[in-house]
Amino acid sequence: MTTVHVAASGPDAQLLAPNQIVPLLIGATVDEVERELVLQTLARCDGNRTRASRVLGLSVRTLRNKIRLYAASGIDVPACQD
């Protein structure tokens, strides 16, 4: 399994240009990229699932289901703030 960390969350987050992001994604599965996007978005939204679902264009229910799958797989998920 490939771990893709595109950018750290928080005020010191380094923004990567598209030509820097694409090489990080090569070799990762779509599921891995989606999971990382969901987790990074949750972190940037301080665990607020309602806000993260809006940013991602998902329903809160879909986001919650994805989070449950990740947690069941032993993946750390930012704590819920809403």
Image: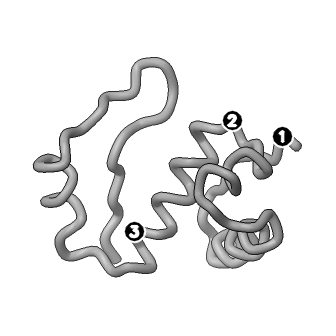
On the rendered structure, is 80 left or right of 54? right
**Where in the figure is residue 38, as x and y percent of width and height?**
56, 59
Looking at the picture, does residue 60 appear above or below residue 46?
below
On the rendered structure, is 30 left or right of 75? left
C-alpha distance separating marks 1 and 2: 7 Å
On the rendered structure, is 45 left or right of 38? right
- How packed is label 2: few (under 14 Cα within 10 Å), some, or many (20 or more)? some
Q: In this figure, which residue is indicated by the disc labeled 2?
A: 46
Coloring applied to the structure: one colour
Label 3 amino acid?
Val
Element at label 2: loop
Q: In this figure, which residue is indicated by the disc labeled 1?
A: 81
Q: Earlier in the sequence, mark 2 or mark 3?
A: 3
- How packed is label 3: few (under 14 Cα within 10 Å), some, or many (20 or more)? some
- How packed is label 1: few (under 14 Cα within 10 Å), some, or many (20 or more)? few
Say which quarter of the image contains residue 60.
Answer: bottom right
On the rendered structure, is 35 left or right of 6? right
Measuring 63% from the left and 48% from the top, which residue is drawn there? 42
Q: Earlier in the sequence, mark 1 or mark 2?
A: 2
Looking at the picture, does residue 79 appear above or below residue 14?
below
Measuring 38% from the left and 79% from the top, which residue is drawn there? 30
**Where in the figure is residue 14, as x and y percent of width and height?**
31, 28
In which quadrant is the C terminus drawn? top right
Element at label 3: helix
Label 1 amino acid?
Gln
**Where in the figure is residue 57, as x and y percent of width and height?**
62, 61
Q: Earlier in the sequence, mark 3 or mark 1?
A: 3
Measuring 67% from the left and 49% from the top, which residue is drawn there? 52
C-alpha distance separating marks 2 and 3: 20 Å
Q: Residue furthest top?
A: 11
